[in-house]
Amino acid sequence: MLIMRHELLLIAITVILLLVEIFLPGDKKSRVITLAILLMTAVLILGFVPGPSGTLFGGMYQTTALISMLKNILNIGALIVMIQSADWLRKPENKEKISEYYILLLSTLIGMQYMLSSGDFLMFYLGLELATIPLAALAAFERFKEKSAEAGVKFIFSSALSSGILLYGLSMIYGTTGTLYFAEVGPAFTGTPLQVLGFIFFFAGMAFKISLVPFHLWTADVYEGAPVNISSYLSVVSKGAAAFILTILLFTVFSKIALMWSNVLYIIIILTITMGNLFAIRQQNLKRFLAFSSIAQAGFILLGIIGQSQYGMTTVIYFVLVYIFSNLGAFGVVSIISNRTGCETINDYDGLYRTNPRLAMMMMLSLFSLAGIPPVAGFFGKFFLFAAAANHGLYILVLIAIINTIISLYYYLLVIKAMFLNRSDRPIPKFKSDFYTSLGLILCLAGIFAVGIASTIFEAINGLSFGLY
Amino acid sequence: MFSNYIFYFLSALALYSSVMVLLSKKPIHSVLYLTLTFFAIGGHYILLNAQFLAIVHIIVYAGAIMVLFLFTVMLLNLNKEERSPKPIWVKAAAILAGIMLGLVLIGVFRGYDLRLIQHPMESQIGLVKELGKILYRDYMLPFEVSSILFLTAMVGAVLLGKKEQI
Amino acid sequence: MNALNSIPISYYLMFCSILFCIGVIGVLIKRNALVILMSIELMINSINLLLAAFSAYSNDPAGQIFVFFIMVVAAAEVAIGLAIIVLIYKTTHSIDIDVLNKLKW
């Protein structure tokens, strides 16, 4: 019971929200926002209470201190997204759908947590689907906007296709090893041609979810069309969960063919970082811009995996934690401005500093963190990732990554220049953010600084993670 | 030997009708051919002595999913032919890609080592009794999680389907 | 009536690969969103049959349980997918995927 505490708590609050939705009179629906955020905060705090580890259901479900921590990280991201959506949900056209929004969001979180805790490919697949299918409904949340519906259809098609490919890989792995349990697949996975093909199919399916380059085409369209908060959830929590489970599976189940998958990763990292950056330069819409920047960041995440060491895994987790705060900070600003004014392009942001200095500062710090400029956490995240890859002797790869970091600096600075230096005839009018938006942004800001400065966080993660060698 | 002929017949039927799903101009014909494919695959399950799967397959696919498709086609009155098909070179490239994928798969499967499969006896695992025991003992957790999946799918479908009230 | 004794498993492997490829080709060449969804169902069916065959030949029930859950997930996926297709139809009066071009770089 206690072993599965994260998931059970989330299921409990989902059911509470479902019941509240049924019994709450129609004119008081907006109170659900406060309730949901309070409940999620409670879950987050309870999740940090140390609890037992172990396996359940004959190895179907497993948890360790590391996995609990990963779940807590996801909980943090989800909580911030829930806080940031409050302003958008208060709009009159969304008032009827508040509880549905939170229920779907929480159920995807449940799916991710089951996926992280799975000890079996069946459980992994179910968790993955539970984390994906409701997100399609959320992407199409603003139903009668053409863009939102289009984002939904693109998301559900690409995710259905990718899970089909992933399943084909799993069926080959099952056929050659005769089992679905991670613990038994690992030793039996010796790298016969059929197993390698199965692995490639599996990896392609996962690459769709993390949006690595040959499989990234859905990302920008879905991020642009979906509501801003869903895009931020997709880019941070969903991607983070998929990256975590990919790391764990590569290090445990597929450890015997590490030589092969590190070669695959090598090429994919270069492609992902470069393409993500080059396409980000030419974007005008900030959501698309952040989408391509998040593709590039996904490539950076893989740098830690290719390091194959305990240190590499630590850097992956640490980088995702930093990335959650920085990306949510940027998306938070985009979200509030998009809600209040409908402006989403970079030119609209001209002169933002003059009218809304706080938002402009927040955006600047988030973008600095994404780019990796020293005082903020993003610098340490990227630095450790590079160190992990360099420890493994991949100097050329690290060099390419550093060049790309410089390119990325260019386009992040374009946005900052627009906000601080450009003048505009029609700047975004001054407005006052509501309580929840400010709270969400303050949390991100605190995260950006605290995670970078407090080395104990890195040490704590390092104490729990594991690597190949 | 009799089962060999059934295998060939069902495979040919499934392949023919699945190709026809793609070749049909009207969506409703695609739906009907797809149903035929599903029945052929259901026959394959019976051939494999997986009776539980055969029944679930017919109920879920031919019963639920195809009815959903049919409803959508009827409800939206979509039974029109495709107006402007994709350009020929896109089709050619797609078919070429598909055939190459098929060749890779068949090539890999040809070298498949049959070591693991040495149970020529009658397989009894596909019967309802056996599978039920395993499903409710070892696979209890996935079973419960799939209930959450259905709940959220229902919430999602209701969310997408309900009328806008402003 | 039992295929296990007289039909080698490689026949099932071939059959399933061909069916899978037909599904992939369908996803690539069709423009009607409904037919694309059907092609994805075809792919998933070929995977199901493959898993069931592996499971039956190696006398291990895990594969058949997996198939059962894939069917469950496919049903949920189709429900959401069709709901979104209906939405698309309501906003654009077409389900041709080429009308989905509002989002482009």
Image (cartoon, helix red, strand yellow):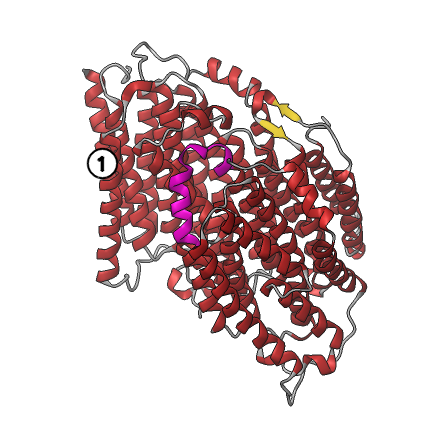
Q: Above or below — where is B80 with respect to A160?
A: below
The image quadrant of residue A144 is: bottom right
At which x and y percent is residue B43? 31, 25
Q: Residue at x 58, y 45 (%)?
A: A241
Left or right placement of residue A120 versus residue A98 in this view: left
Q: Nearer the viewer, residue A205 or A374?
A: A374
Residue A239's spot in the image, x, y percent? 55, 50
**Which residue: 58% across, 36% down?**
A466
User: Is residue A131 inside the magenta stretch?
Assistant: no
Label 1: which residue?
Answer: B107
| The magenta segment | A249-269
Query: Going by the picture, which residue comes out furthest to the bottom?
Result: A425
Is A232 placed left or right of C80 in the picture?
Answer: right
Q: Chain of mark 1?
A: B
**Quadrant of image for the N terminus of chain A:** top right
Local packing at callout 1 (Cα closer than 10 Å; few below 14, some 14-19, many 20+) is some
- Secondary structure category for the residue under label 1: helix
Residue A278 vs C36, above or below: the answer is below
Q: Position of residue A200 (x, y in %)?
A: 37, 41
**Which residue lies most toward the top here?**
B121
**Residue toward you, A116 or A432:** A116
Q: Is residue A125 visible?
A: no
Residue A268 is one of the magenta-drawn residues: yes
The residue at the point 63 percent across, 66 percent down is A373
Q: Amino acid at mark 1?
A: Gly
**A176 or B125, which is in the foreground?**
A176
Residue A103 versus residue B24: which sits nearer the camera?
A: A103
Q: Position of residue A197 (x, y in %)?
A: 33, 38
Query: Taking the image as drawn, is residue A458 in sight?
Result: yes
Looking at the image, residue B47 sits to the left or right of residue B107; the answer is right
